[in-house]
């Protein structure tokens, strides 16, 4: 079957140059893969192999050192995310590309429901509709109802992570990047999260994910990209 | 997306200035003082675009030129060189070619400014409500009860106790003065708002409230904002894009998360590494 790829990562490398120490820290090197709608690719490899760096390069949180990151937009254009203008990247983040990180940065007073619904608000969805959808997701992820109207700053690690996940999933991005979406969750909650991810796959979202457990990769991934530790340079 | 502001080559020199001012100052010389004529090159070749509803952060230490940039754009001072175009629907206005009356009208109708020091943005000798009325009057809102109700509405929105509307802002706390200043700046629903170190010197819980308020307002009114700050946390929470300045020059610009997580320039790396 021929499917149209949504993302093509070609010879992607990332290293960091630290001016103070005059040192180059290699992270990911010569990464190649393609992502397709409705499929989840798991990035695997030991800690320090540059898995998160790959996701961050795609999201443009990191500036890649070399290589191309060709994204096919909803309108059908091909954009090299490494070279696209900041405004273009912001627009794609708002409408097409989502990222669930391990950290939750929120405004101090923003209530959990609004934190989750924010991507919808940014797309112009009304507050009421946004909150309705956020409620459904939070219920599905087993976040107690009495927490919905509270800012997530004081939540437990697992609760914050699920809030983060709900926010990442709510707007149904075309490409979703997941950095350890189940890291601090128990088995039961992990199952719920996997069900949600499966549903997004069925809806056609292309996903790239980092999981730390091999059995999770087996359960949910359609394809695997293995990263190795960068060679030491001196 | 529509562009609202296009700034190119904006420069500012304090002092007599000479031919070599720009070639012997900047981050690579670690100074902004010209060794030939002792002028201060506060700003050189600042170029950026701002889109409708966007928040741009300008980050840098004291003396980096960030406030000078905003002061030039808000007509608090005229720049040494460069241009800035403000787009208002189909209309284009070249800021530094306008006459004083045109500048005043732009400043009163379309721009807003919140200073670090509330003393600069507010008239301390008239009441909080009076400060807002002053700005509305300049925009030809002349009906007393309308002014009164607009002031009431704005102060409620910025969480100033409305029973204190008729008191002098000099008797308010710093955080409250800042909120009155924001209410005043917003009274004309400006399409472009300048915020110069607005949370500096306020305690953390008050800072949080002001930042929340700014973002809520931005979402509500789709106001484009230029936020000048030395605080990385403020930039992270507010700005989608950020310029990093040193000795009057932009040393790095990009998406805020990229600037903070993968800074390229030596100075930005140092700045990020030394943040609390």
Image (spheres, helix red, strand yellow):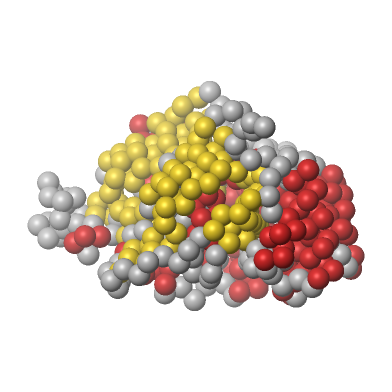
Asked if residue A60 is positioned above or below residue A108 in the image, the reply reads: above
Towards the viewer: A209 or B35: A209
Residue farthest toward the front in the current orientation of the protein: A1
Towards the viewer: B159 or B262: B262
Asked if residue A3 is positioned above or below residue B124 in the image, the reply reads: above
Towards the viewer: A67 or B246: A67
Residue farthest toward the top in the current orientation of the protein: B90
Residue for point 84% across, 49% down? A133
Q: Is residue B220 left or right of residue A147?
A: left
Number of disc labels: 0
Splitting the image into 4 quarters, where does residue B1 fall? top right
Q: Residue A149, percent across and down? A: 84, 63
Q: Is residue B217 left or right of residue B72?
A: right
Q: Residue B202, percent across and down? A: 57, 72
Residue for point 67% across, 39% down? A37
Residue for point 42% across, 74% down? B274
Asked if residue A26 is positioned above or below residue B147 in the image, the reply reads: below
Splitting the image into 4 quarters, where does residue A156 fall? bottom right
Residue for point 25% across, 60% down? B27
In this rendering, does residue A226 appear at all?
yes
Asked if residue B17 is positioned above or below residue A161 in the image, the reply reads: above
Towards the viewer: B208 or B181: B208
Q: Residue A54, percent across and down? A: 51, 55
Q: Residue A88, percent across and down? A: 52, 39
In this rendering, does residue B268 appear at all?
no
């Amino acid at each position: 079957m021929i499917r149209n790829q949504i993302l093509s990562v070609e010879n992607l490398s990332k290293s960091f140059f630290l001016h103070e120490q005059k040192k180059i820290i290699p992270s990911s090197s010569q990464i190649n893969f393609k992502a397709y709608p409705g499929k989840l690719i798991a990035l695997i490899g030991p800690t320090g192999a540059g898995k998160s760096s790959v996701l961050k390069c795609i999201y443009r949180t990191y500036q890649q050192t070399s290589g191309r990151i060709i994204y096919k937009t909803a309108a059908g254009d091909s954009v090299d995310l490494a070279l696209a203008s900041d405004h273009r990247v912001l627009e794609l983040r708002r409408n097409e590309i989502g990222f669930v990180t391990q950290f939750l940065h929120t405004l101090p007073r923003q209530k959990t429901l609004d934190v989750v619904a924010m991507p919808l608000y940014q797309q112009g969805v009304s507050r009421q509709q946004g909150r309705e959808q956020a409620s459904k997701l939070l219920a599905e992820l087993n976040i107690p109802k009495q927490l919905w109207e509270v800012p997530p700053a004081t939540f437990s690690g697992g609760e914050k992570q699920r809030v983060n996940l709900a926010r990442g999933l709510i707007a149904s991005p075309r490409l979703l990047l997941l950095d350890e979406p189940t890291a601090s969750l128990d088995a039961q909650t992990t199952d719920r999260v996997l069900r949600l991810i499966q549903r997004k796959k069925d809806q056609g979202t292309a996903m790239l994910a980092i999981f730390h457990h091999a059995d999770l990769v087996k359960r949910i991934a359609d394809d695997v990209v293995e990263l190795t530790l960068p060679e030491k340079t001196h | 997306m529509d562009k609202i502001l296009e700034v190119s080559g904006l420069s500012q020199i304090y002092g007599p200035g000479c031919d070599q001012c720009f070639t012997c100052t900047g981050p690579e010389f670690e100074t902004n003082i010209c060794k030939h004529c002792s002028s201060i090159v506060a700003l050189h070749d600042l170029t950026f675009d701002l889109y409708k509803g966007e928040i741009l952060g300008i980050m840098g230490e004291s003396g980096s030129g960030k406030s000078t940039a905003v002061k030039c754009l808000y007509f608090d001072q005229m720049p040494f060189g460069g241009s800035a175009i403000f787009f208002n629907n189909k209309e284009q206005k070249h800021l530094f070619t306008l006459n004083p009356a045109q500048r005043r009208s732009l400043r009163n109708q379309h721009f807003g400014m919140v200073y670090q020091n509330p003393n600069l943005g507010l008239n301390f000798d008239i009441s909080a409500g009076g400060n807002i009325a002053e700005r509305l009057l300049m925009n030809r809102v002349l009906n007393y009860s309308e002014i009164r109700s607009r002031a009431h509405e704005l102060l409620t929105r910025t969480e100033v106790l409305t029973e204190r509307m008729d008191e002098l802002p000099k008797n308010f706390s710093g955080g409250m003065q800042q909120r009155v200043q924001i209410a005043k700046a917003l009274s004309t629903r400006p399409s472009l708002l300048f915020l110069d170190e607005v949370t500096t010197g306020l305690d953390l819980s008050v800072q949080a409230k002001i930042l929340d308020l700014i973002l809520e307002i931005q979402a509500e009114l789709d106001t484009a904002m230029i936020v000048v700050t030395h605080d990385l946390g403020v930039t992270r929470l507010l700005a989608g894009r950020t310029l990093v300045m040193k000795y009057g020059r932009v040393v790095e610009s990009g998406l805020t998360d990229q600037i903070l997580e993968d800074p390229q320039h030596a100075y930005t790396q140092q700045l990020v590494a030394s943040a609390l």
